[in-house]
Image (cartoon, rainbow, N blue to C red):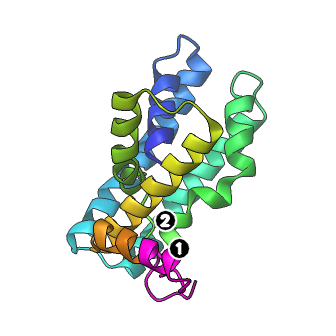
Amino acid sequence: MVHLKRDFQALIDSPCTVRRRLGHDLMRPTKEMFALWQKVRDGTLSRRAFRRQMGPIRQRIEGYLLRGYFDARVSGFCKELWERREHLWTFVEIDGVEPTNNAAERSLRHAVLWRKSSYGTQSARGSRFVETILTVVTTCRQQGRSVLSYLTACCQALYTNAVIPPLVLGTAS
């Protein structure tokens, strides 16, 4: 929803009055949604109450998208969202999913910084190595595991023909 909020702001900033109106119409309930989400995050609103209060907000947003779907000046924008509208509300239905992509961006930060400082790789094989090792590093960090210990165990397993330890805890390799 955060990226959509930026898209809604772009509509507001448009010289076209229809686009501006749609942007304002979509931004109001989006701001309401984020205010409710903040209450969920700080523990002052239950997920159950959040789901209930999101019903009318969802209906308003979907109504604006449907209105725009039939207006040539905004139909491209609205049609794509309308046809994928169920995905917009995943964070409402599934605990642990947020309306922002902050967690994903945080987990990718290390890889982005590495890419910027190293200028990437010189081959497809190098790219596969980097994506694999960065996955291992990120996963181990998320699980509070030592990256060095995990990689050492993998190397030992490889050279002793043992089973390589699973990367994700609680799974078999």
Which secondary structure lies at badge 2? helix
Quarter of the rendering occupied by the C terminus: bottom right
Q: Which residue sits furthest front?
A: 160
Q: Which residues are magenta?
A: 154-173
Which of the numbered marks, if any, corresponds to residue 119?
A: none
Task: Check whether the beta carbons of the residues at disc 1 and disc 2 lie within 8 A of each other.
Answer: yes
**Circle 1 is placed at which residue position?**
93
Above or below residue 58? Residue 161 is below
Question: Picture coordinates of residue 36 (x, y %)?
Answer: 33, 62
Residue ID at (33%, 46%): 110
> Is the stretch drawn in magenta largely helix, strand or loop?
loop
Kindly indicate the quadrant of the structure image that contains residue 86: bottom right
- Residue 90 falls inside the magenta stretch: no
Give residue 47's position: percent from left, percent from top. 38, 77
- Nearest the camera: 16 or 173? 173
At label 2, which amino acid type do we have?
Phe
In the depicted structure, whether residue 163 falls above or below residue 156: below
Which residue is identified by label 2?
91
Task: Give me the residue at 53% from left, 10% from top.
Answer: 15
